[in-house]
Amino acid sequence: MLTDIVPMVNFDPPPTPALRVRRAKRVKRSSVKLEVEDSQSEGDHDHGFKETNLTVPWSIETNLTVPWNTETNLTVPWNTVTTAPAASTSTPRDSLTAIEKAQEKGSGYLLLENIDASVRADILKTICERFDSRDIKVGYDSVRKEISMSLPDYLREAGSVWMLTAVNWLSSHGHGRMLEPSPRCNMSGAYAGSIKEADWQIRPRNSKFPTVVVEMGTSKPYNQLLRDKDLWLQGTKGVCSAVVLVNLKVEKDSIMGFVELWRKDGSKSYHDIFPSSTAEEEKATVKEEEKEEEKEVDLVEALKNIFTPTPEPEDTKMTDGDKATHETEDDTPTVKDGESTVEGNRATPPDDPYLLASEIFGHAANLPVNMDPNTRLVLPLAELRDRIMASVTNGSSL
């Protein structure tokens, strides 16, 4: 639990002067920071405390025996018994404190576990009154009794900029706001009582739930992304038909990431964003995945089934006379900046990201997009990857 707790910690042998743990807080997946108080110190003066670190598993037991030494880093012998802190230690004030501390660091993902129904409403009310969707994404899983909070970071915002440009283009061309930040949805079915906000959604007009949602994970663990996926696909009465998971991870000077497309029938498609794989590695990966799971298909092929190019209208096909006339002229097409060229019945991606995004999300939402057939596109993952890498490297928008 990412709230302040005060476990009973026994030092063996007892140090002199005696110390006691004033406060303990988990700051990472497996790190707990202890605030140790000298019993001879007066009041809450800073000189009476020192910080030390305990390396322990995910949850910490309420009673620990710590072998004491003079080092500031203490190693805790761990047994197989792990007991999560009691739900009563979570209060609205605790959650606000955790959020504010995460904001000071610049980003973060907070998970409050074992939230009892008696305090759940007060915590959610306090969070929602203090923060809106631009500051924090809030969710409550009624099955696992967890409140999750995602704070924005630069990787998530880089992708958001690209998506917002698509929304602006669609609005200016009369297509409405098909892709939008997700409001807080009240789930139903097995997840009745749950609350969820996606990073982005595609929602038809007058629909309570979105048909397609995008969940982006940077500081959020991948396992939590999978839980979010289950909540959308199983808690929206079948309205949500697809969930796109974008998982990005930064380690030192390198960035790793992948995209998954999940459907409500349980099928999954996967594609690496970066680092980019060689052709041989991609072929080997595809063969391996085909053996492990026949249902799993390449993400590009799955998206082709969604973003199908529009067939050429009959009245635009050339007659024999037109062909003869055409053959006598220079058949090299003239392409302006931002336009696409057509090879047969399929358009190549234009440089303009607005045209690109409008086609992708228009078809994903299963809504009509009255655009020229030459701009009917499938999702060019290579171009998307290049745009994301350029944005992260140069600090520019997608």
Image (cartoon, helix red, strand yellow):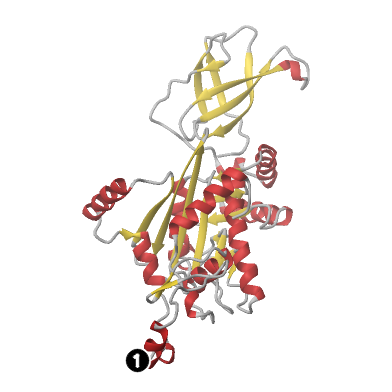
Under circle 1, the secondary element is helix
**Point 53% across, 29% down: residue:** 31
**Point 43% across, 20% down: residue:** 77
Q: Is residue 358 above or below residue 150?
A: below
The picture places residue 164, in percent across and down from the top left corner, at: 62, 62
Q: Is residue 131 above or below residue 320?
A: above
Q: Is residue 185 above or below residue 207?
A: above
Q: In the image, 201: left or right of 49?
A: left
In the rendered image, the quadrant that contains the C terminus is bottom right
Let me know if residue 109 appears in the view.
no
The picture places residue 303, in percent across and down from the top left corner, at: 40, 66
Q: Amino acid at mark 1?
A: Asp
Q: Is residue 326 above or below residue 51?
A: below
Q: How many marks?
A: 1
Q: Residue furthest left?
A: 291
Q: Quadrant of residue 134?
A: bottom right
**Point 44% across, 61% down: residue:** 380
